[in-house]
Image: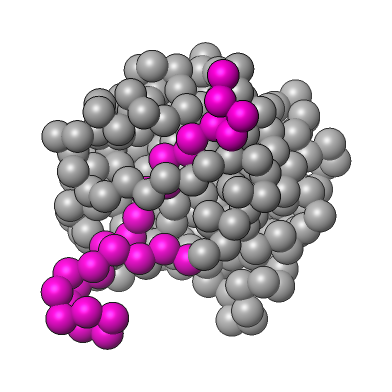
Amino acid sequence: MRTRPIIGVTLDAEEPGGYSKLPWYALRKNYFSALAEAGALPLALPHHPELAEAYLDQIDGLLITGGAFDVDPSLYGGGDTHPTVTLKAGRTDFELAVTRGALKRDMPVLGICGGEQLLAVALGGTLIQHIPDSIATEIEHEQPNPRNEPGHEVAIEEGTLLSRIIGKPRMAVNSAHHQAVATPGPGARVNATAPDGVVEGLEHPGHRFALGVQWHPEYVVDPADPLIFAAFIEACRK
């Protein structure tokens, strides 16, 4: 077994402009830092669905990151696309291919924010396309304050993998999403909810480690956030 498990990390894709006049990949440094500090060797995965299995042959775990885009509702029977929805088809095609491949191998998977939503779809679940149109709430799930500050708390479901990791019934989280999981998929279960009932986490007990959280633990808003990465990396060592 490697001293540092290799974690494949999905990237965001940007159109020409800003950094480059050509299409380019991007990801915040704190995703990579959180993994490295937890004892992993992060490895970026460019979007080539046809290489998904080859990537999986080289890594010990998969981290599906977030981004300013949405999963195509046609992939989960969501009906007409809401006007607020932004699609990145190439990224989603790749992330679904590599996530489904990882789950088939029972490889540890951690989904963060949009990655949690992608994991739900890969598990056969569905999404709410736009929270304000579906749930009456006073919580701002796209918080106006900085992402390194809490937006609200979540309640963690007793008896779940997440509960065993966190070790307490509630924690503070940041919030940067306009969509949410509606149903977690067959066999999967919700493990965290916001005070308004919005799903904030899911997991599948039929897999060695298949965990998604709606918040961004890489910002360490709550002292328990690093425990999520530590548990993920420990699962990748087994």
Inspect the magenta stretch and tell me whether residue 88 lies in it: no
Above or below — where is 209 with respect to 118?
A: above
Instruction: Give how far across and how far down residue 21 sits, in percent.
Output: 15, 81
Instruction: Give how far across and how far down residue 12 sits, in percent.
Output: 33, 60
Q: Which image quarter: residue 84?
A: bottom left
Residue at x 53%, y 42% (from the top left corner): 41
Given the current orientation, which residue lies at the most extreme right position? Answer: 168
Above or below — where is 205 with respect to 55?
A: above
Residue 174 in view here: yes
As rendered, which of 142 and 101 lies closer to the eye? 101
Instruction: Give how far across and how far down residue 202 sits, in percent.
Output: 55, 36
Residue at x 71%, y 60% (from the top left corner): 220
Q: Is residue 10 left or right of residue 181?
A: left
Q: Which residues are magenta?
A: 1-28
Residue 199 in view here: no
Colour setting: one colour
Q: Which image quarter: residue 167?
A: top right
